[in-house]
Image: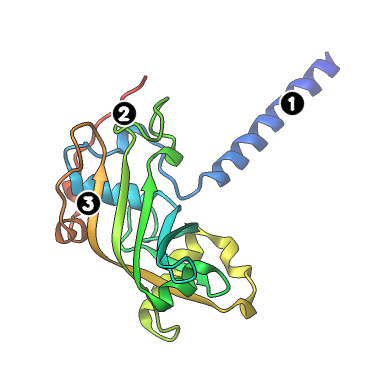
Amino acid sequence: MALKTLVNRFKVLFFLFFVVRFHNSVQGRLLSSESKPHRNDAAAYARWLVSQNSWGVLNTISSELGGAPFGNVVSFSDGLPNEGSGIPYFYLTTLDPTASNALKDQRSSLTISEYPLGTCGKRDPENPACAKITLTGKLVVLDNKSEEAELAKSVLFSKHPEMKGWPKDHNFWFFKLEIEDIFMINWFGGPKPLTVDEYLHYKSNNLAFELLDTI
């Protein structure tokens, strides 16, 4: 009986350890099915998609590749989950092509998928019912002494604590994407009509929720 009790306690401790590790691994992501906006509310859906994600593919124009686009996986933050501004901020080093490209040509686009959030069920990431959004505009470096740079630092380091320990001598700068166009697909029938103004001035109390579809 004593051995059985010890085994059961070990199982409980192992389960709790797994739960804690899992929780930490998804910190900053919203996995609740009741919090996903209705697909017809384009502004709410777009802001939810950007707010809940922590990384995407940032595309810049590469002079070294003769003006060809260069895509790179990057971390970003627009604020804490459910409190984001909709504006993606980045912490990039000029030792990497993305930042150096942007300093020469600001034209950029950030693509984000719903798939990493775990809210697409068994759908493939390319399935239109698994949302994707591309924000296109200019990737602008911030003055490190500005208030906006302090804001960028706060929202990025809150969502990506590891950034605090990145080497100070690697010439990291804070950047933001000044959005000029939005392309989002979150269901069949083509992209949702959504202006930059509607996206940036969306109010969270206008959210309409739906339960996730399951397959």
Q: How many marks?
A: 3
Residue closer to the observer: 125 or 50: 125
Q: Which residue is mark 1?
A: 9
Quarter holding the C terminus is top left
Residue at image coords 78%, 19%: 5
Separation (CA) of disc 1 from disc 2: 36 Å
Residue closer to the observer: 2 or 46: 46
Q: Which residue is mark 2?
A: 212
Quarter holding the N terminus is top right
Q: Which residue is mark 3?
A: 204
Separation (CA) of disc 2 from disc 3: 19 Å
Cβ–Cβ under 8 Å for marks 1 and 3:
no
- Judge whether 63 appears above or below 3 on screen: below
Cβ–Cβ under 8 Å for marks 1 and 2:
no
Q: Earlier in the sequence, mark 2 or mark 3?
A: 3
Does residue 196 appear to the left or right of 135 in the view shown? left
Residue 177: x %, y % from top left: 34, 67
Q: Residues within 10 Å of mark 3 (few under 14, many from 20)?
A: few
Q: Residues within 10 Å of mark 1 (few under 14, many from 20)?
A: few
Residue at image coords 23%, 54%: 182
Residue 111: x %, y % from top left: 37, 52
- Judge whether 25 appears above or below 177 on screen: above
What's under tag 2, amino acid-wise? Leu
Does residue 188 appear to the left or right of 8 in the view shown? left
Q: Earlier in the sequence, mark 1 or mark 3?
A: 1
Q: Residue furthest right?
A: 3
- Judge whether 189 appears above or below 2 on screen: below
